[in-house]
């Protein structure tokens, strides 16, 4: 696993990266969250290109976490429960391949954990429909433009933040209260 000072990386996409970022910035053991683009062909894509669906990239967050505080499995557990992994290329009103549910694994161990969790969750009937989350190797990651970073914290009164992100934060509080930073 890629590490820096014993830190590890997880790269996930569950719709708009502002939502994923807002949730994971509140989790104990998460040191950094960078919104960006992954899984496409075009090098150095812009937000506008990704939104037009022309690059093949998904909006993702690359999460730097301390595995001594939170495990990769726990990161994925939060991921699964704070978005709908059963809707193909959509989260709520956000529609397009850039909003697909995706896990970009960094090594074989992450791949096995993600695939096993997906299989177990599908068998558990947690959701009415089957999980469509893509599980693929990380090939590229491009940080999004600066104005996308820490978006919720900088724009809490913006309507998208109130209507879409706030309910995800409430869900995280409900299910993962013990994992939240103080």
Image (cartoon, rainbow, N blue to C red):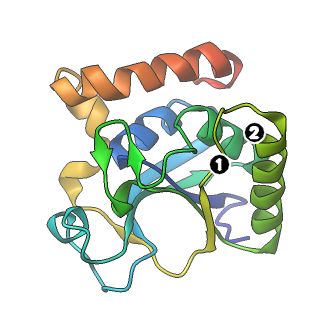
Quadrant position of the N terminus in the picture? bottom right
Q: Disc count in the image?
A: 2
Q: Quadrant of the rendered structure where residue 111 is?
A: bottom right
Q: What is the x, y in percent for residue 117?
A: 80, 49
- Which circle marks residue 18 in the picture? none
Q: Is residue 4 visible?
A: yes
Against 25, is 33 above or below? below
Q: What is the x, y in percent for residue 99?
A: 38, 54
Q: Residues within 10 Å of mark 1 (few under 14, many from 20)?
A: many
Q: Nearer the viewer, residue 35 or 14?
A: 14
Quadrant position of the C terminus in the picture? top right
With 90 as the anchor, is 174 left or right in this view? Answer: right
Q: Mark 1 or mark 2: which is in front?
A: 1
Against 81, is 64 above or below? below
With 21 as the anchor, is 136 left or right in this view? Answer: right
Q: Residue at x 66, y 46 (%)?
A: 130
Residue behind mark 2: 69
Q: Nearer the viewer, residue 30 or 52?
A: 52
Q: Is residue 67 visible?
A: no
Q: Nearer the viewer, residue 72 or 116?
A: 116
Residue behind mark 1: 131
- Cα–Cα gap, marks 1 and 2: 28 Å
Q: What is the x, y in percent for residue 51?
A: 22, 61
């Amino acid at each position: 696993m890629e590490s820096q000072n014993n830190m590890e990386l997880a790269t996930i996409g569950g719709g708009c990266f502002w939502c994923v970022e807002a949730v994971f910035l509140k989790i104990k053991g998460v040191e950094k969250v960078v919104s960006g683009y992954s899984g496409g062909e075009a090098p150095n894509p812009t937000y506008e290109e990704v939104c037009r669906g022309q690059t093949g990239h998904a909006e993702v967050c690359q999460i730097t976490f301390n595995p001594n505080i939170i495990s990769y499995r726990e990161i994925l557990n939060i991921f699964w429960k704070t978005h709908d992994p059963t809707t193909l290329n959509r989260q709520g009103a956000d529609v397009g391949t850039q909003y697909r549910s995706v896990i970009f694994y960094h090594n074989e161990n992450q791949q096995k954990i993600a695939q096993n969790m997906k299989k177990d969750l599908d068998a558990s009937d947690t959701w009415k429909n089957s999980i469509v989350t893509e599980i693929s190797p990380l090939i590229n990651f491009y940080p999004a433009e600066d104005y996308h970073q820490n978006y919720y914290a900088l724009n809490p009164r913006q309507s998208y933040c109130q209507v879409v992100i706030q309910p995800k934060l409430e869900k995280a509080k409900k299910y993962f209260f013990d994992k939240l930073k103080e």
